[in-house]
Image: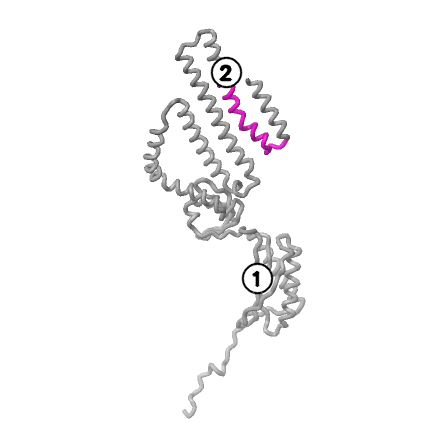
């Protein structure tokens, strides 16, 4: 029996090739312990049959060997189902957004379901009535639910986060409390967010599901970067717009975080106290890199404006001395 186990495992490994993520390799890893238990169950069954055949099997020993073999066989099936479900979720985690962001939660749910059903099957095979057990579970479930209410709330909130997918592992998010960071892990109780200073914010799933979240990677990581600029009132605005767009397109084309195909534009919007203000819209590949592309654009634009003679004015305050002078009233 052990030789058959080794042969089957070797065949599955060869069928899976060199890739550790193949289904055959996953199946082989899931079968390693169950096949050992299966060999033990078969050995107990054969021992029982040999003892019966040679007349050396008392009724109690015969019954004990039969029940033990049945329990070991059921344990092999349960362990195989648990291993296969856990490894399949891990196997396909890299191919599915849902599994990638929540394979820990799904693996935990699968394990609880498999082990719970397996325990009921074992008890049923031993002749133990399940009706009192199920009735007792129904009675005690309320007390357990009340005692574990925060834990259950976090667990089901985590499941809700997995199904709705407002955030995913790797997304850059901003919490309602102001913290920003990358989603590191979505667990069964809490979500881990790695902030830019390289520390971790651990948010309970229940709190996270009730709060407002800004996901800068949804639906795509690309986002617009507005840059406000002001020029002198004597400037030729058509010339200003043309030069600004040339600089913006060059930055989007040459900068590693720019989006070259983005159709950048300029919008004039304010007659300010000392300048005519407008906004230039750039595009970056992700939220965190907006600082770098904005910095490069400002430096390039300042240099180009100096070459073109376009003035960015200092703030100006004019004092009307005639109006503000305290003249005596007429006829006084």
Q: Residues within 10 Å of mark 2 (few under 14, many from 20)?
A: some
- Give the residue drawn at x 50%, y 78%: 319
Q: Which residue is mark 1?
A: 227
Q: Quadrant of residue 251?
A: bottom right
Secondary element at image label 2? helix
Q: Position of residue 165 (x, y in %)?
A: 49, 46
Question: Is residue 100 in the magenta section?
Answer: no
**Which residues, given as a range, are shown in magenta?**
18-44
Q: Is residue 30 covered in magenta? A: yes
Q: Earlier in the sequence, mark 2 or mark 1?
A: 2
Q: Residue at 62% across / 53% down in the picture?
A: 257
Q: Is residue 246 left or right of residue 223?
A: right
Q: In the displayed structure, would residue 84 be above or below residue 227?
A: above
Residue of label 2:
43
**Quadrant of the image occupied by residue 328:** bottom left
Is residue 136 rendered to the left or right of residue 13? left
Query: Residue at 59% across / 52% down in the picture?
Result: 285
Question: Which is more foreground, mark 2 or mark 1?
Answer: 2
Residue 312 numbered mark, or none = none
Q: Position of residue 18 (x, y in %)?
A: 63, 31
């Amino acid at each position: 029996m052990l030789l058959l186990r080794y042969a089957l495992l070797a065949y599955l490994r060869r069928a899976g090739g060199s890739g550790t993520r193949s289904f055959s390799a996953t199946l082989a890893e899931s079968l390693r312990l169950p096949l050992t238990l299966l060999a033990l169950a078969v050995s107990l069954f054969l021992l029982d049959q040999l003892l019966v055949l040679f007349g050396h099997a008392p009724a109690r020993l015969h019954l004990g060997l039969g029940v033990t073999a049945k329990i070991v066989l059921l344990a092999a099936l349960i362990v195989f189902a648990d291993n296969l479900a856990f490894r399949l979720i891990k196997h396909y985690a890299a191919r599915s957004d849902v599994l990638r962001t929540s394979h820990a939660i799904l693996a935990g749910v699968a394990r609880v379901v498999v082990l719970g059903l397996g325990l009921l099957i074992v008890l049923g095979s031993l002749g133990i009535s399940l009706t009192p057990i199920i009735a007792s579970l129904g009675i005690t479930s309320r007390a357990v639910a009340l005692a574990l209410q925060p834990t259950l709330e976090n667990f089901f909130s985590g499941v809700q986060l997995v199904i709705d997918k407002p955030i995913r592992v790797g997304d850059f998010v901003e919490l309602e409390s102001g913290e920003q960071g990358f989603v590191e892990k979505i667990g069964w109780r809490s979500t881990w967010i790695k902030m830019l200073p390289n520390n971790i914010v651990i948010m309970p799933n229940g709190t996270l599901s009730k709060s407002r979240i800004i996901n800068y990677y949804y639906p795509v990581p690309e986002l617009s970067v507005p840059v406000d600029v002001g020029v002198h009132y004597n400037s030729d605005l058509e010339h200003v717009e043309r030069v600004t767009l040339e600089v913006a397109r060059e930055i989007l084309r040459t900068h590693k975080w720019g989006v070259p195909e983005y159709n950048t534009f300029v919008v004039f919007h304010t007659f300010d106290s000392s300048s005519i203000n407008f906004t230039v819209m750039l595009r970056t590949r992700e939220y965190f890199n907006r600082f770098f592309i904005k910095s490069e654009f400002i430096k390039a634009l300042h240099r180009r404006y100096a070459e073109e003679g376009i003035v960015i004015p200092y703030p100006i305050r004019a004092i009307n001395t005639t109006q503000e002078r305290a003249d005596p009233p007429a006829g006084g």
